[in-house]
Amino acid sequence: MTVRLTVNGVRHEGRCEPRKLLVDFLREDLGLTGTHVGCEHGICGACTILVNGEAARSCIMFAVQADGAALTTVEGLMRDGKLHPLQEAFREHHGLQCGFCTPGMLLTALDFLRTNPAPTEAEIREGVSAVLCRCTGYHGIIKAVEAAAAQLRTP
Amino acid sequence: MSLIGAPVRRLEDARLLTGHGRFVADIVLPRMLHAAFLRSPHAHARIHHLDLGRARAAPGVSACLGGQDLKPLARPIRAESRMKGYHATDFPPLAVGKVRYAGEAVAAVVGESRYAAEDAVELIDVGWEPLAVVGSVEAAAREGSPLLHEEAGTNVLLARAFVQGDAEAALSTAAVVVGDRFRFHRHAGVTMENRACLADWDAGGGVLTLWSSTQVPGLLRDALAELLDVPAHRVRVVAPDVGGGFGVKSALYPEEVTVCALARLLGRPVKWVGDRREDLLTSTQAWDELIDARLGLAADGTLSALSARVLADVGAYSVHPWTASIEVIQVISFLPGPYRLPHYRGEAQGVATNKAPMGPYRGVGRPVSTFVTEALLDRAARRLGMDPVELRLKNLVRPDEFPYRSPSGVVWDGGSFVESLERARELAGYAQAREEQRRARERKRWLGIGVAVYVELTGVGSAIPASPGAAINTGTEGATVRVDPGGTVTATFGVACHGQGHETTLAQVVAAEVGTRLEDVRVIEGDTAASPTGTGTYASRTAVIAGGAAMLASRAVKEKALRIAAHQLEASVEDLALEDGRASVRGGAGRSVTLREIAAAAYAGAKRLPQGMEPGLEATRFYDPYFGTASNASHVAVVEVDVETCAVTLRRFVVVEDCGRIINPLIVEGQAIGGVAQGVGAALLEEVVYDGDGQLLTGTLMDYLVPTASEVPAIEVHHLERPSPTTLGGFKGVGEGGTIGAPAAVANAIADALAPLGVEITELPVTPERLFRLVHCSGAREPAKTVGGLSQTRDERDA
């Protein structure tokens, strides 16, 4: 089947089997390997991307379901060659170790801050609990999201 | 400020934050094929026939192999050991004749895509003859049990004891003896990146390259050379970005051998990327031990004796190179903990069952030994009416007693056992917490305070093998520090990284020791073709051993650079200082040369160098800390238990750790907190469950519960930073400690909370269901409700 979609502002057209997972299409057909596959059953959140602006798990969507959609992946977060404030905050606060969950964590946090720009710590914990991180104990991640929220609120 | 000790932001973060990391699954080679495995649906069964015909004929399939087909291409994995009482057994990469656990690889299909390969797996026809499943260690150890490995003649794959003094005699005269049967259930490491590997055979040069999500590229290189009969200098193993290891990726796996054999057979690259089901079924698991332990004390609380028998479920196979002994021998090695203990007897048996193989996981044995010893100490304190912190302080090895030889023969070179506990007591506000607990109890709210103190041997040198008797040396690592003609520095290591930030920390060490800028140092690791000989990263060894090798190689380079600079500046070496990439004459009114100018001369030949000096500016050095060094910490957990819902809330978690001289405090804190988070998961949530037929019931992340941000508390970490007296640089390891102390601290806090109800914690994890049974069904004093027949009573258990 033919799939037409926009990823990080760039339009793509590709052909794939109807059963092909969206994450496999992104990684194999478009070469965007920043989105990771951690469980293929929608629990770990490593594959989280934005589909039409909202966080979604690309391991439990078929590529054909994203036909016509606008997607954002981790490769699309930088602006003008600079890290997004959320990426910068993750580096500043040691919010990543192995980096495998990080792309999904960043996109989840971005969507969370869109819906809740001034969260409490408990709200951040709940917000990012959609993604499993095995390395950090979440400490640096929570601090990074707190810091990014403050930064993003500053006009 | 020195670069060693500076909170440098990680150099590897930029690529990982932007999607430019390079994990095995991200690597694409021309003409690459994809492997999928047929895995056994049975825990124990004979393979009568294996019909691969339909799979081989399926569209897009290049090859399909069973165990018999692979036999001429690769030897079986076999973990050898000199340890007495150990039976080595074969672990064929694809099952031959029979399978021994559910999930064991039976056949491999190689296709144009993973989708095509998996389709063809469905077409394989196997004739199974199910065999009696060996599920429990107690049944497996009995005479007449069905055997997993007929060649061993027993399911008891290993037996060993450590003895000092006469524990039984001392227990018979002790004023107080506390004891129980403890159980720490089976655990899975759950790296967020599943295991994956990609093999490429270069027929022209006869060179095999394996990219693998592994902690141990050096160990794999040596093992693959042997099993595949390729000379080691023609085997290259690369660990690119690796998404977590925690010990799970430190053994040689069947898939790694199989894809190498397939790539050589087909002359095309073959990639396998494991999925989560395969990870939970086949990655090495941890713990799963039954411990019968008794602790004897004098009336004043002085420890006299500890006696323990440990029965370990080692699963179906012994993994290379650690063998089935790695976990349980560590339990009996470290049960005495950081305490003075005159009499000790620790016996261990490792018993094969039809489950996934046991392997090293963060803490290895010590989360279990610490749980048991610390639980017994709390029980003794309650019996003696002593404060549990005071009881520990009375028995901890004191500063004037180092070096201290433990009852199992481990030498503690130094440490801050007493200081760490005193500091943790103070920082946790222990006295106030006790007061708050007292008030809460009056209102029937159950607050508990749990303490755990541990010491671990890190940076283990060649005197003590990381795994007893294993046929490899794990005590050394090398470093090459090379200054190129442009004056920038490349440092290569045999270790490998899976989240610890070596590209930053090892660069800090090299930059500080050479005397150059951090941005001018690049660290390369995890590639056997690029590095000096080494094994990899495991057992909290990299800061100590690779850090030590980095210091030696950097100092050798610096010394030569200064000799060249002295020649250039017509000054004496003693008068020169090399800092920030510039060698200056002290008090020499700005007379200086840059490292770039020094390096240019180094490669320009004899006429620009001191007479007789060999050109070039690089050094390779190896470091062996010989014994290894003691890293220690005290953990304090404060919990609240809701006896109605059996939910446990962690209100505070305080860590006072001593990992010696700190290279980067951000990284140390990250390691400590991440370790505690895994320990909290182990204490409260995580359990691998098999049913009586050896079927895995926790085969998804909906069943195997990894802590989320909502379950991990804010963790407060404080550093003591007492440099190691024995290692170069004063470094000690810090990678595992959090996971060693946390389960014990949490278990003790829950037991402390429920002490008025007469509840003791003998099993981990303390899931809500277990807690419900303890509180409501086990004869607890109050607020027990009668729910008949669910569990044995406390009296029976204690009997």
Image (cartoon, rainbow, N blue to C red):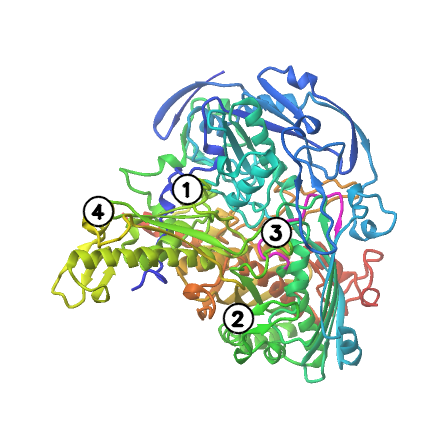
Q: Pinpoint the chain carrying mark 2.
A: B
In primary-sequence order, the first of circles 1 and 3 is 3
Magenta portion: prevailing SS class = loop
Residue B413: mark: 2
Pair 4/1: label in front: 4
Circle 1 residue: B530
Residue A62 painted magenta: no
Q: Are marks 4 and 1 on the same chain?
A: yes
Note whether B789 is above or below B535 in the view shown: below
The kind of secondary structure element at disc 1 is: loop
Q: In the rendered image, is residue B77 in sight? A: yes
Residue B360 is tagged as 3
The answer to the question of whether label 4 and label 3 lie on touching residues, with beta carbons closer than 8 A, is no
Q: Nearer the viewer, mark 1 or mark 2?
A: 1
Q: Please give the chain letter of the residue carrying mark 3.
A: B
Q: Magenta segment, which residues?
A: B349-365
For discs 2 and 3, the disc positioned in front in the rendered view: 2
Earlier-in-chain disc, 1 versus 2: 2
Q: Residues within 10 Å of mark 1 (few under 14, many from 20)?
A: some
Please rate how many residues cluster around mark 2, counting C-alpha atoms within 10 Å: few if below 14, some from 14 to 19, many from 20.
Answer: many
